[in-house]
Amino acid sequence: MTIPDYQTLMLPVLRLAAAGETRVADVSERIADDLGLTQAERDELLPSGRQRLLHNRVHWAKFYMSKAGLIASPARGRFVATEKGRALLATAPARIDVPLLLREPEFRAFYRNEGAAAGENEAPTRPLDPPPAQTTPEEQIDAAHAALQAALRDELLQRILANSPAFFEQLIVDLLVAMGYGGSHKDAAAQLGRSGDGGVDGIVNEDRLGLDRIYVQAKRYAPGNAVGRPDVNGFVGSLVGLGATKGVFVTTSTFSQPARDYVRHLSQRIILIDGQELAALMIEHGVGVRSYRMVEFKRLDEDFFGEE
């Protein structure tokens, strides 16, 4: 039989997650048994040949429901239904899909951000959905890329929060060096996290000669715990005391609007990097990620066929 699409799999995945903490591989086997899939169907791979089709669709079903608050990940590689997920199952839904998830404000916010790359008036293609007839192949590729990037940003932040504060400080070192700051990795590592100046966690050279310095504050906060203006104000106060003019405030969560408004009118140059921006910079500069598949697209060479 045909393996169901990822939205059709959402309901059985949530039911199995409600039975107890589990893994994608275990859920995939249970669903394959329930559907009576043959071994060949269980082993069917994506066109890339790198992952089983059923595992991929179960993963996306789990990921989207986690963004709606129906599923939580208590440990690496494991997930379980939340109270909200159990409450939804108690209503005996006939189906769980994206339109239903869009009732949740947090999922609407995520879904809107994920589709930003597709344009303000275009609905992005979701992973493994049949492509809509009104979109071109290029638009479908861009939308699929946006979806994969959104999932990767989310996974990066989850892994950062699962590690220690010392790991987070080292991550900031690696990122700043990858972006061209710090002079050298050794210099950056020696300076970050050792200043002990109140609201400043570290100092990084802006260039190899150390002609100017950037002061850094790093807050490893859980999602939903926004950094407010008082925290930013404390950081700015420390910069004033040090006679510094440049600072970077990095957090794994978000900044409140008053905090963002506050830094716009300062004489110091303060850059606020929230969790999504941090993950995007890590992807852009290859920190904590690596390429696993390269796809080359070719176009017709019009000059080749010209006879003039």
Image (cartoon, rainbow, N blue to C red):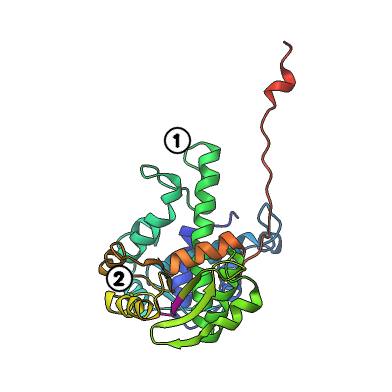
In this rendered view, identify the residue nearer to me: 73 or 164.
164
Residue ranking furthest to the left: 258
Judge whether 222 appears above or below 177 on screen: below
Instruction: Report the front residue among 6 and 279.
Output: 279
> What is the CA distance from the residue labelled 2 to the residue labelled 1?
35 Å
Residue at position x 35%, y 56% from top?
99
- Snapshot quadrant of residue 64: bottom left
Residue at 47%, 41% in the rendered image: 132
Q: Nearer the viewer, residue 48 or 168?
A: 168
Label 2 element class: loop
Residue drawn at point x = 57 percent, y = 72 percent: 24
The residue range painted magenta reads 216-221
**Left or right side of 261 for 50:** right
Q: Is residue 196 left or right of residue 105?
A: right
Dominant secondary structure, magenta: strand
Badge 1 density bin: few <14, some 14–19, many ≥20, Cα 10 Å: few
State the SS at label 1.
Answer: loop
Return the residue nearer the eye: 207 or 235.
Answer: 207
User: Quick one: quadrant of the N terminus?
Assistant: bottom right
Q: Quadrant of residue 270?
A: bottom left
Membership of 219 in magenta stretch = yes
Residue 303: horizontal and vertical position, in percent?
70, 21
On whether residue 306 falls in the magenta region, the answer is: no
Q: Would you say residue 166 is visible in this rendering?
A: yes
Give how far across and how far down residue 205 sits, in percent: 55, 72
Q: Which residue is mark 2?
A: 91
The C terminus lies in quadrant: top right
